[in-house]
Amino acid sequence: MALPADDHAVPVRHRAAGVLGLVAASALLRLRFRATVAAVRALRRVPLAEATFEEAAGIVAGCAWAARAWPGRAACVELSLAAVVSAAVQGRRLTWVLGARFGPTATHAWNEAEGRPVGEPSEPDHPWHVAIRL
């Protein structure tokens, strides 16, 4: 997802929640992956409203904004999990998706809202195959 050129284009609430989301994602990803998945599943049981695509784009942008100064690794897994936590902090629910592709072989994580990937190309050169959707 392309970041807005102006920092003020990302609302403060999304930036603050993005920082909190990155801290939480960093902690969750230090656990065994099974425990991380269990935590996300537990978060899905909390009664939250589904984020609209526009809200989700703002949440993802807030996490991307926070990652610019993040001292550790902030790649797709960290950012997509941070967006799930950030959304929950703001009373919304995002879907966390982990997938893979063949030729070239790669793994990737992203968020979905309203059944569409957020911040991802709509027609990727090499399609992703979903492994886990939470």
Image (cartoon, helix red, strand yellow):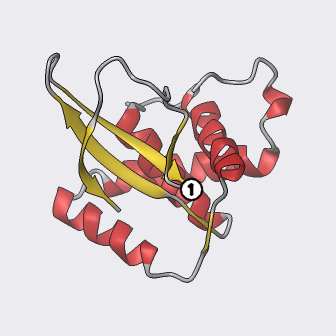
Secondary element under disc 1, as helix, strand or loop, is loop
Answer with left or right where residue 38 lies relative to residue 22. left
Q: Which residue is mark 1?
A: 114
Where does the N terminus fall, quadrant-wise?
top right
Work out whether residue 28 or residue 131 is closer to the camera in this orientation and state it.
Answer: 131
Residue 128 lies in what quarter of the image?
A: top left
Q: Position of residue 31 (x, y in %)?
A: 23, 58
Residue drawn at 22 percent across, 66 percent down: 35
Q: Is residue 123 left or right of residue 64?
A: left
Q: Residues within 10 Å of mark 1 (few under 14, many from 20)?
A: some
Question: In the image, is residue 126 above or below residue 90?
Answer: above
The kind of residue tagged 1 is Glu
The residue positioned 14% from the left and 18% from the top of the image is 103
**Hey, which residue is sitting farthest front in the picture?**
123
Residue pictured at 68% horizontal, 64% vertical? 90
Tell me which corner region of the image, top left, top right, bottom left or bottom right, holds residue 126. Answer: top left
Q: Position of residue 55 (x, y in %)?
A: 70, 52
Tell me the residue at 61%/46% (across/down).
18
Q: Tally the numbered discs.
A: 1
Q: Which of the image's four quarters has the C terminus?
A: bottom left
Tell me if residue 76 comes above or below residue 50 in the rendering: above
Q: x, y percentage for residue 131? A: 21, 49
User: Foreground: 2 or 67?
Assistant: 2
Q: Is residue 24 above or below residue 7?
A: below
Residue 24: where, in percent of width, then height? 46, 56
User: Quadrant of residue 106 in the image?
Assistant: top left
Asked if 102 appears above or below 46 in the picture, the reply is above
